[in-house]
Image (cartoon, rainbow, N blue to C red):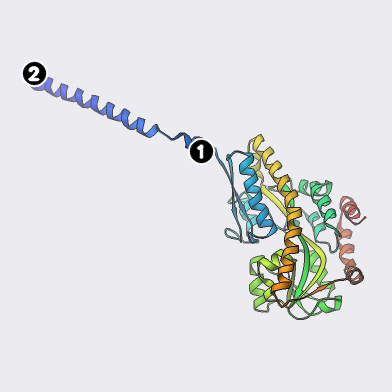
Amino acid sequence: MKYFLWSTIFILLIGTFIFFLMKDMFVTEELFYDDDQEGLNEQIVIRFSHVVAENTPKGLAAQQFAEIMNEKSAGRVRVEVFPNGALFSDSEEFTALLSNDIQMIAPSFSKMTDIAPEWELFDLPFLFDHLKDVEEAFTGNIGQQLLAMLDDRGVKGLSLWSNGFKQMTSYQKPLVEPNDFANQRFRIMPSRIIDKQFTLLNANPVIIPFNDVYYSLETFEVDGQENTISNIYSRRWYELQRYMTISNHGFLGYTVVMNEDFWNGLPDDIQTQLNEAMAETTKWILQEAEQMNNKMLIEIERDSEMEIYYLTNEEKEVWKEKLQPVYDMFLQDANRELVELVEKLKN
């Protein structure tokens, strides 16, 4: 009996020893890691969603920003860019941003007016005459004042990006005089300023999401639209329209914004790097957008049957006179600060 008892105790001791020995081996196996993987758990991922093609000014700027930020942060920040509305449409992306499903978007200025009506400023027709005026507005005090108006609205305003001057297209007839717009249906972005513009031209404005414009032109839901050369070319709208007027009547830009809570949770050094990367990208895209629009205009002239007309200065003055009530409407509701902004831009 004693022999059996001691044998049992011995076997239990041996089993316990083997158990703890094997346990230590498994723990050692689990804790082993490759030095190359060190720090990956600390990587910050920023999902940047937009609705235009990769080969447009905004598409290229988003990718440029991602590359600059990766370099500045030595890989600590990874910006994942999702173009062409792959994640959300332009009518969905703002809600997705506020819920932090994505962290960055770059909506058109018109989309910002629901948050801060002051952004209607950039929808005014013939606001800019030259690219240098745009650069001064985007990177100077005007841009900073408008971005500051987004504080405490759920988003952090980072920068203003350029796409270029807008042009008019139509399937029905050439658009040379204001009367040529009469009774035509035009796709517009959601903006009371743009709506008023087409109403003054006796046209019928129709709000249609960006990704649905091709179908709307193809099925004749609308007769025409206004946009930059790069969007007209990359979306192949020129194949569906017979006439284009180089009017430079409006300017299309984007407000680059980030989820405010996400921004506030970033380390100070990362915020500094983001601002630096954004400033570099903003300067780059101002020049790149102009070159791209010029290049794509040449390609449309060469490869399509679209009839292209260039407005003369005298014809532009007729358009400006016709559209003056848009300014009157805007200034009537504007505060003194906004009135001063308009005066700065027009003088």
On the image, the x and y values in percent for residue 219 come to: 65, 78
Task: Name the quadrant containing residue 197.
Answer: bottom right
On the image, the x and y values in percent for residue 209 come to: 67, 66
Reading the image, the residue beneath label 2 is 2
Reading the image, the residue beneath label 1 is 41
On the image, the x and y values in percent for residue 48 come to: 62, 51
On the image, the x and y values in percent for residue 192 come to: 79, 64
The numbered dot on residue 331 is none
What kind of residue is marked 1? Asn
Kindly tell me whether residue 265 is visible in this rendering. Answer: no
- Which residue occupies the foreground of this view, 238 or 341? 238
Q: Identify the element where label 1 is drawn.
A: helix
The answer to whether 347 is drawn above or below residue 204 in the figure is above
Q: Disc 2 vs disc 1: which is toward the camera?
A: 1
Instruction: Locate the C terminus by quadrant.
Output: bottom right
For the point 88% across and 54% down, the residue is 345
Q: On the rendered structure, is 314 left or right of 265?
A: right
Kindly tell me whether residue 309 is visible in this rendering. Answer: yes
Instruction: Locate the N terminus by quadrant.
Output: top left
For the point 67% across and 45% down, the residue is 260
Of marks 2 and 1, which one's residue comes earlier in the chain? Answer: 2
Q: Residues within 10 Å of mark 1 (few under 14, many from 20)?
A: few
Q: Residues within 10 Å of mark 2 (few under 14, many from 20)?
A: few
Mark 2 to mark 1 CA distance (whole Å): 57 Å
